[in-house]
Amino acid sequence: MIYMDNAATTIKKPDAVYDAVLDAMKHCGNSGRGTSDASLDASRKIYEARMCLTEFFGGEDADRLVFTANSTEALNIAIHGLFEPGEHVITTQLEHNSVLRPLYMQRERGVCVDIVPCSDEGIKKGVICSRDIEAAIRPDTKAIVCTHASNLTGNVVDIKSIGQIARKHDLLFIVDASQTAGALPINVKDMNIDVLCFTGHKGLMGPQGTGGLYVGERADIKPVKSGGTGVLSFLESQPTELPTRLEAGTLNGPGIAGLLAGVKAIEEIGVDNIYAKEHMLMKAFLKKIKTIPGIRIYGDFDMLPDNGRHCAIVSVNIADMDSAEVSDILMNEYGIATRSGIHCAPLMHKFFGTQNQGMVRFSFSYYNTVDEINEAAEALMQIAALR
């Protein structure tokens, strides 16, 4: 199988990730629940992962690195734990449902939510202008919630610019880094990010069931769940100190061990080197498919190869073929795994007018090859010729 659905989850991981998960399952106990060697081993491994990820994202306090099951849980913790009725929140049309649905729930509670539309000056490419975000700020605005990159088009948002806007207006800045953590440099301090939400199973090359959020000192997040923490057990309420304030229940020790191994492998390879290879693969694919009759390519690729910031995602349609049909042909006849449909990004499909057709998304990783790119492009050419 040629796997090109890395924006959903990476399958190919460094061997150290598989080894770390298995070793933890064999030897690690329950972190913070006892003084046995197994329990202490788990605690040490989880603390090492906190330290590693904090440094990786430019944070300063490992206690502010909170583990979750994925970025969806991290975003729910942030969105449900920060806002009160009467407050105003700004988000964008690029967002995934992991941002939109929690915000819609908050809107039902009385939080006012404004969604900044794509600003393409008449050209439908799905980009967000930071000036439009600043124009949406009101006296009662509390926060900006924004993705770092669209999971549908790969368009990268200038979060450093938006972070500066947020700080200038004394707003909280919450970033969904699901598509960029491990693929693009992220520094929470330099980018004025108050809450960074990330998942482990994509660019960080970790297992599914891992993720987290880095909580800056300006963000006071109320717990959205409570329970066992292994400390302060006589308290009737959740402890106030991070990370236990937001980590009720047993953590995914084997998963976190694998995530740690993934991040270490990324540091060894280098984020810039990973981006350079993924970017090269994406450009090679674009070059081969852009002349296919009936092809429609979605997103803003005009900046390439100049300033070059774009996730390794290319979403397409072939004439009026249903995206699911194209994706099924790619898998069943060519052994190429892609993702079809709406990709949990309904507002972007409304923007492009593809609510019924969906899109076929190709997403590349560091472990894809040029030969695989060529095979995928040739498959698209053949499908288009036979439609």
Image (tube, rainbow, N blue to C red):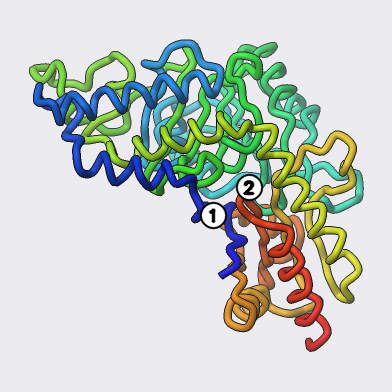
Which of the 4 quarters of the picture holds residue 244? top left
Q: Dot 2 lies on which element? A: loop
Would residue 387 be seen by someone viewing this image from the given angle?
yes
Estimate the x, y position of residue 109 in percent, counting from the top left.
Answer: 43, 37
Helix or strand or loop: what does disc 1 sit on? loop
Q: Nearer the viewer, residue 31 or 66?
A: 31
Q: Position of residue 45 (x, y in %)?
A: 30, 27
Q: Nearer the viewer, residue 40 or 196?
A: 40
Q: Which residue is mark 2?
A: 366
Residue neighbourhood size for the residue with mark 2, other residues' Cα within 10 Å, grouped as few (<14), some (14–19), many (≥20): many
Disc tally is 2
N-term-proximal mark, 1 vs 2: 1
Which of the image's four quarters has the N terminus?
bottom right
Residue drawn at (47%, 40%), measured in percent from left and top?
A: 199
Q: Is residue 369 above or below residue 59?
A: below
The residue located at (13%, 21%) in the rendering is 236
Q: Amino acid at mark 1?
A: Ala
Quadrant assignment, res 90:
top right
Closer mark to the observer between disc 1 and disc 2: 2
Choose top left, top right, bottom left or bottom right for residue 288: bottom right
Q: Residue 181's x, y, as percent?
A: 57, 35
For the residues labelled 1 and 2, say whether their Cβ atoms are less than 8 Å apart: no
Which circle marks residue 8 in the picture? 1
From the viewer's perspective, tell me whether residue 302 is left or right of residue 214. Answer: right
Indicate the amino acid at tag 2.
Answer: Tyr
- What crowding class fits label 1: few (fewer than 14 Cα within 10 Å), some (14-19), or many (20 or more)? some
